[in-house]
Image (spheres, rainbow, N blue to C red):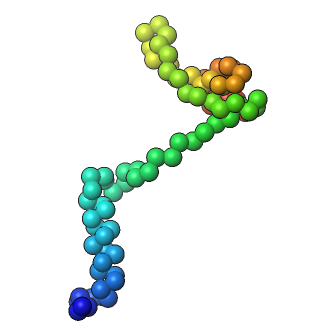
Amino acid sequence: MEAPIGGSPITSIYKEKEMAQASRGGSKNSRTTVNKQKFFCSCGGEIQLKQIAQSGKVRTIAECGNCKRVERRPSDFN
């Protein structure tokens, strides 16, 4: 196997692999993995985000699955 001009064959393989992954449909700054952040209430229950319709508007609320406490944001539980 001949070494390409300007680098070793291993370097060129990695560059080709990166180019193939980058051109798979996502933009340069797009998220490739999704990490969901989990919030927990002081009682130990997991906080779930829910959307409800009130007076014609969609509002997001956070509700504890264990004690059924409702707040506006998950950070309000601390």
Q: Nearer the viewer, residue 66 or 6?
A: 66
**Drawn side of residue 77 relative to residue 26, left or right:** right
Residue at image point 27% right, 65% down = 20
Residue at image point 49% right, 21% down = 51
**Drawn side of residue 55 relative to residue 48, left or right:** left
Number of numbered discs overlaid on the protein picture: 0
Q: Nearer the viewer, residue 73 or 67?
A: 67
In the displayed image of the protein, which residue is found farthest to the front? 1
Q: Whole-percent x and y of residue 6?
A: 27, 88
Q: Nearer the viewer, residue 1 or 49?
A: 1
> As displayed, is residue 63 above or below residue 8?
above
Residue at image point 27% right, 72% down = 16
**Drawn side of residue 36 relative to residue 28, left or right:** right
> As displayed, is residue 63 above or below residue 55?
below
In the displayed image of the protein, which residue is found farthest to the bottom? 2
Residue at image point 32% right, 68% down = 18
Q: Whole-percent x and y of residue 69?
A: 69, 20
> As displayed, is residue 26 above or below residue 70?
below
Q: Whole-percent x and y of residue 39?
A: 64, 36
Q: Whole-percent x and y of residue 23?
A: 26, 59
